[in-house]
Image (spheres, helix red, strand yellow):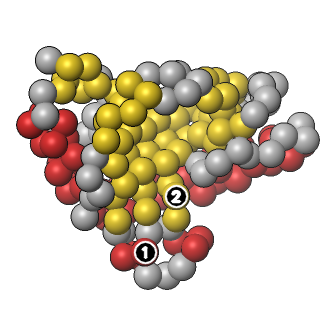
Amino acid sequence: MIDAPQIVRTELQLMAYIHVTVPREKIREVMGPGLAEIHSVLAAQGIAASGPCFTHHLHNPTDIFDFEIGVPVKQKVAPADRVKPGEWPAVIVARTVYHGPYELLGAGWGEFQAWIADNGYASAVDLWERYLSGPESGSDPSQWRTELNRPVTKK
């Protein structure tokens, strides 16, 4: 379900994002429109995305998802409506790639979190998911790939 996790240092990454707080069951209703809004603002400002979209969950998701829908960019975005400029910080993270449908991401995160704890790391409260391939790239969920990132420190 997940690739062998690694500990890596990320690089500072500029981003355009929208902050959203919704019940878990509404996530699919906000993702598409949120990404469309970000891409519209980027197009209006002549800025291209520099990688796959992502979500930054400000804490472990529960019944309520408090997160940022984001797109990496190479230049700072001017704020427009709900779209804000931001930065994905340079930080030490545990990283893996989950293979499968979004409905089973929770199980992938559980397996990943167990690896983090079993290998002597403490997790930060936030986490990142980068959507490497999904429904837009094919209808077979076994081919979908989501990169999981969790900031960590050694215990």
Label 1 sits on what residue type?
Gln
Label 2 sits on what residue type?
Leu
Badge 1: few (under 14), some or many (20 or more) residues near its Cα, within 10 Å?
Answer: some
Q: Where is residue 67 in the image (x, y as percent from the top left)?
A: 45, 35
Q: Do the residues labelled 1 and 2 touch (CB within 8 Å)?
A: no
Q: Distance between the residues labelled 1 and 2?
A: 10 Å
Q: Is residue 64 visible?
A: no
Secondary structure of the residue carrying tag 1 is helix
Residue closest to the eye, 14 or 4: 4
Q: In which quarter of the image is residue 74?
A: top right
Residue at label 2? 132
Residue at label 1? 143
Q: Can residue 16 be seen in this view?
A: yes
Q: Is residue 42 left or right of residue 72?
A: right
The residue lying at 52 percent from left, 58 percent from top is 132
Q: Where is residue 53 in the image (x, y as percent from the top left)?
A: 59, 49
The residue lying at 42 percent from left, 56 percent from top is 146
The residue lying at 43 percent from left, 75 percent from top is 143
Q: Earlier in the sequence, mark 1 or mark 2?
A: 2
Figure quadrant of the N terminus: bottom left
Q: Where is residue 47 in the image (x, y as percent from the top left)?
A: 84, 40
Secondary structure of the residue carrying tag 2 is strand
Q: In this view, does 65 lie to the left or right of 71?
A: left
